[in-house]
Amino acid sequence: MLSLRKTLRGTGVAVVTPFKSNFEIDFPALDKVIDSLIHNGVEYIVTLGTTGETPVLDKQEKIDIVNHTFDKVAGRVPIVVGIGGNNTHDLIKDLHQIPLDKAVAVLSASPYYNKPSQEGIYYHYKALAEASPKPILLYNVPGRTGKNMTADTTLRLANDIPNIVGIKEAGGDMAQCMILLRDRPNDFLIVSGDDALALPQLACGMDGVISVAANAYPKEFSDMVRHCLNGDFGEAKQINDRLIHAFELMFAENNPAGVKAFMTEMGLLDNYLRLPVVPLSKGLHQSVKSFLGK
């Protein structure tokens, strides 16, 4: 089974989905975003992550975004495709309907709202892994799902199921992270899903980050991550210190409303989101502009 610890070492970006004023997908803006990410040195792209507003995309739109991303990236960097949700049976269908031929892995968030037991989470991922034509990356994000996936469950999946090869850990629990890093199988990828905690998590031994903030700051963020992976935490801290307030602004109200506000002011896209998510409040958006010197 393919080990992704080298392939996906560094900075991956959960790419936003730009929209036009009529709320259709803005593919030229998506091209601009992808070019910005690759030209500024990120190691890989994650399409259809929750930062891409996947809960409000229909199946055909998801297929169109994946195919467009494959064509635009054209092998320049690896691509991970997000396929997650709380209906195991439907996700198995998605694994065969959403194009995966040019992807290196599937990122799948733990089931939300259902709040399954740890045993339910285990068998959910076991079913996905057995059906998936690509390796599975777990995604623990209890702030969105309402249920933490424990270190014991993650390690059980990592050891029992060959097609589960890594995790994006966004639980915010440093003790849980350190247990995962201590006890993981040798070739099991562990990346941060918390931009604001990335530096200390990398210091503990994580392999990289799947970032939201790097949509707006691809060079700075990926440079910071590379400094960490090279053991140069002094340089990394200097960059991180400059970005801390940006992280605060990005996540103060909603993701991806925060990062889209930054990207709007940077000229990368227009500031449209699909309901129920709305743009940042006027005052917070002004704080973004002030941070950017506008």
Image (cartoon, rainbow, N blue to C red):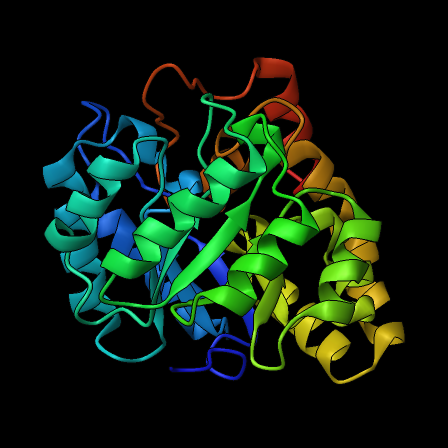
Residue 84 percent across, percent down from the top left: 36, 42
Residue 187 percent across, percent down from the top left: 56, 80
Depth check, front residue: 46 or 145: 145
Depth check, front residue: 263 or 252: 252
**Residue 50 in view in this figure:** yes
Q: Is residue 79 left or right of residue 102?
A: right
The residue under the point 72% across, 57% down is 198
Depth check, front residue: 23 or 99: 99
Q: Is residue 211 left or right of residue 278?
A: right
Which of the image's four quarters has the C terminus? Answer: top right
Q: Quadrant of residue 218?
A: bottom right
The residue under the point 27% across, 34% down is 19
Residue 106 percent across, percent down from the top left: 34, 59
**Residue 289 in view in this figure:** no
Q: Quadrant of residue 253?
A: top right
Which of the image's four quarters has the N terminus? Answer: bottom left
- All told, the count of numbered labels is 0
* 76 shown above or below 256: below
Residue 86 percent across, percent down from the top left: 36, 31
* 188 shown above or below 46: below
Q: Is residue 285 left or right of residue 278?
A: right
Residue farthest along the right direction in this orientation:
234
* 10 shown above or below 192: below
The residue under the point 63% across, 36% down is 148
